[in-house]
Amino acid sequence: MSGQHFKWIWLPTAVLCVLLVPVLLFLPAKPKPLPAPESFLPQRKAHVDHSALMPGPYHTPQQVTARCLECHEQAESQVLHSSHWTWEHEAVEVPGRSEAVKGGKKNVINNFCIGVGGNWEGCTGCHTGYGWKDESFNFSDGSNIDCLVCHEQSGTYVKGKAGMPVEGVDLVSAAQSVGFPTRSNCGACHFGGGGGDAVKHGDLDSSLYFPPASVDIHMGKHDMQCIDCHRTEEHQIAGRALSVSLDTRNQISCLDCHSEKLHKDQRINQHTSSVACQTCHIPEVATRESTKTHWDWSQAGDANREESHEYQKIKGEFKYSANLKPEYYWHDGTSARYLYGDKINTSGASDLNKPMGNINKPRAKIFPFKVHVAWQIYDTNNLHLLQPKTYGETGFWTTFDWDSAVRQGSEAIGLDYSGEYGFTETRMYWPQTHMVQAGKQALACNDCHTENPNKKGRLDWQALGYPGDPLRWGSRTIRADKAKESSDD
């Protein structure tokens, strides 16, 4: 080949390379594959066989605790500072209140069994301790820590009054079986909250002990345990319950394992800045066991009514729902909390823990809730909710005397009682985070968005702050503003 011919070949090639190199350099990089969600899960350690380490005999449960603490020396201090022991949280600043306030089960009122004060011996059957039967319980005494309630794996350990093991429990067998907590340990209290299986939460019940994937994809298909998400360090269990917590510290999230942009369909990914994962992936709860949605305490005490699933003389009238579709509200992780002594809403129902957030709040997302409605006792002069003593020989469940019950309960928690009572409507909001479904069983577009303006989907768009269904009028402006606020926050 002559030099002239080579020149005409080389020069265009060189020019093409000069032009292409900058283009290639600035081409968008191929996105890296997202790590598998299971890669974020903690690695489970093998259980240590305690058969030889816990020989017994044990005549009291405190003797089991003493043996545990011989090896696990740091556990005592750790448990004594945990909310599962104290049943309260550190005082935090709450909007609208002049002083920091403490949350926790010991300090807040609910619209199920109402409150702990005066009812210690009955309520503390689910306490991680022994002997909390009155206000004199010593929270600094580590000898009363109950190690077994969270760690025994024999399946035979049952707690009763004041958290003491019921008669006949084999302490040696329970002690020798200990291991890392399983769904059975956590569920023994949390599945039965509110006085029975599935009563309180809606998304927690006995169907989760050994669930199929159709009930919960995590616990069913992947055999996940509670502590895989509620990770625990030094006996501090991650997670916050909106029913008792006043802040969002130590909270857990789907995003601990999953990417917010994991969907192949980018239209779905566009939703994740405003819609919680749970909204689509928990289309229904109480899928195997009905959950309580209404409790009327004013009907209690009627000896002429027949006892049934819907009526108990000691508690009143109930309503239950199966395959419950949640209600949807904006939620930023906090709530407007009713505390003892607060005035009730005299023009309607009083919200005990209404979720905070709205369409303009950057961190808020549309979230699914079970809403529990109740009629519970209140002071008609002071206009605040009352705490009745229900448990024991002098409690309402024995005497059916409301006046005596609220006098005792009010004295126990230091709440004023005028001597006049009535019943008022209250609401509690329970975030739904369990009974998660796989993508194929999650909500589809037409569950929330409809082409027909006369047909309503799941979401009440106007109540959520939209002019209407975003599918019809478009929501790009609000989404853009919300995204901008989030980035500026």
Image: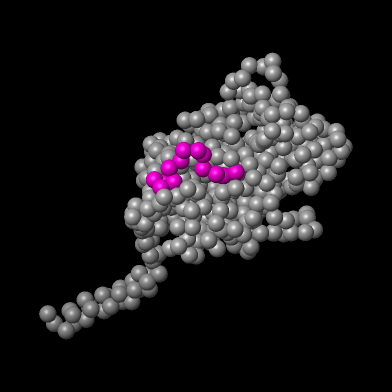
Looking at the rendered image, the quarter that the C terminus falls into is bottom right
Q: Is residue 111 visible?
A: no
* Above or below 20: residue 228: above
Please report the residue visible at 62 percent of the width from the left and 51 percent of the height from the top. 87
Which is more toward the observer, 132 or 81?
132
Looking at the rendered image, the quarter that the N terminus falls into is bottom left
Is residue 169 magenta-colored?
yes
Q: Position of residue 221 (x, y in %)?
A: 36, 42
Q: Position of residue 326 (x, y in %)?
A: 57, 36
Please report the residue visible at 41 percent of the width from the left and 41 percent of the height from the top. 155
Left or right of 174: which side holds 323? right
Report which quarter residue 16 is drawn in.
bottom left
Residue farthest along the left direction in this orientation: 1
Q: Is residue 176 visible?
A: yes
Please report the residue visible at 78 percent of the width from the left and 55 percent of the height from the top. 97
Which is more toward the observer, 401 or 196?
401
Q: In this figure, what is the number of numbered marks?
A: 0
Q: Give the magenta range.
A: 162-175
Which is more toward the observer, 224 or 453?
224
* Above or below 139: residue 169: above
Q: Position of residue 37 (x, y in %)?
A: 39, 54
Is residue 170 magenta-colored?
yes
Please report the residue visible at 40 percent of the width from the left and 37 percent of the height from the top. 211
Give the image's coloring scheme: one colour
Left or right of 428: which side holds 227? left
Report which quarter residue 450 is drawn in.
top right
Q: Position of residue 406 (x, y in %)?
A: 77, 36
